[in-house]
Amino acid sequence: MALALPQEDLERVLEQTRGLWTERGGVRILFTGASGFFGSWMLESFLFAGTQLDLPFRAVAVTRNAEYFSRRLPHLAGDPRVEVLEADAATLPLPAGPVDYLIHSLFAPAALPEMERQFGRATKRLLEIAAQKSVRGCLLCSTGAVYKPPLKLLPIPEASLRFGAGDPLSYPGIRAQVEDQWLAESSRYGLSASIARGFAFMGPRLPLDGQFAVGNFLRDVLAGEPVTVQGDGAPVRSYLHAADLTVRLWHLLVSGQASGVYNVGSEHALTIAEVARAVAGLTNPAADVRILGKDSPFSYYVPDTARIGRAFPLPPPLSFCKALQRTWNWLDPRLKKLAPNLN
């Protein structure tokens, strides 16, 4: 079962989004992917804002497995302001009542051909619903993985080359095709629709296994094992805290003037080896980091965020060290006293 988000993180989101809500009164938002990383942060911060501002916020959470959603996030699934709909987004019935905004966090079936079909059907159906409900704004949560790897050590702007229909069937290629469908269909319906291409993040609910290097390193520390880098540590990443991610997603959805594609992430570039050493140092500055030394392909996964910065002049995001500290504090409060003060 996932714990509720920290009060300080929810307050940070509200502090930087308060102006989006104060004149809107009652709002009802349809979420897909509400049990996931992006979706659960947006849903919980939305409910928190409603409570703090005394506004009648309501949510429709679409999930393919209501029992899993209730077990993982009981405080959200059981909130009387949340209507849980167990359905496939591709065949979602028209929800009763108003829908003011729509947030689509993409799911990922295991088989690529099925993923392609599901993504396309879900995108089409959700935008049909958005049009019928005359929503004020739509947001597609996509990924920076749609970009073809850059050849130089330069942040990736939105105009960079993407994977697409001409590429072999792949997860990035499918996501790029979904983006194209999202923009084309929303334009056809006359909807205000944005795309957030997310890069790498830290924060509560970050998965601690699989494809997220910083999550794997945190898992190693929690298990009392040396932090292990599978490659040579040279690939470059940057990390934005989930609270700052959520702030930017809300502005993209609600501003009413943000239709288009925006990178969302941090520009503070670090090698994977540097990230591993920072994570290992949470409990012991002299902790062992094992770099296995396998050759890693050139990889520079850092966004150019100038476009979203121009659209929304927000306060600077949390530094890497502060973001890491907050993530660690949430993961294991019992070990909090062991972590040095990171500035």
Image: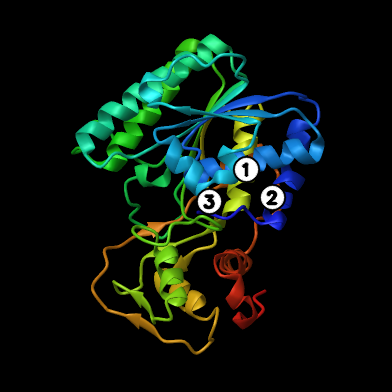
Residue displayed at 22% across by 38% down: 112
Out of 290 and 35, give the one closest to the viewer: 35
Is tag 2's residue or tag 1's residue first in the polypeptide sequence?
Answer: 2
Marks 1 and 2: in contact by CB < 8 Å?
A: yes
Is tag 1's residue or tag 3's residue first in the polypeptide sequence?
Answer: 1
Q: Quadrant of residue 334?
A: bottom right
Q: Which residue is mark 3?
A: 265
Answer left or right for 55 relative to 330. right
Residue displayed at 26% across by 31% down: 116
Q: Which residue is mark 2?
A: 10
Q: Residues within 10 Å of mark 2 (few under 14, many from 20)?
A: many
Q: CA distance from mark 3 to mark 2?
A: 19 Å
Q: How many marks?
A: 3
Query: What amino acid is labelled 1 in the image?
Result: Glu
Answer left or right for 235 relative to 30. left
Q: Secondary structure at mark 2?
A: helix
User: Where residue 303 sits in the image (x, y, percent)?
Assistant: 48, 51
Query: What amino acid is labelled 3 in the image?
Result: Gly
Q: CA distance from mark 1 to mark 3?
A: 20 Å
Q: Which residue is mark 1?
A: 44
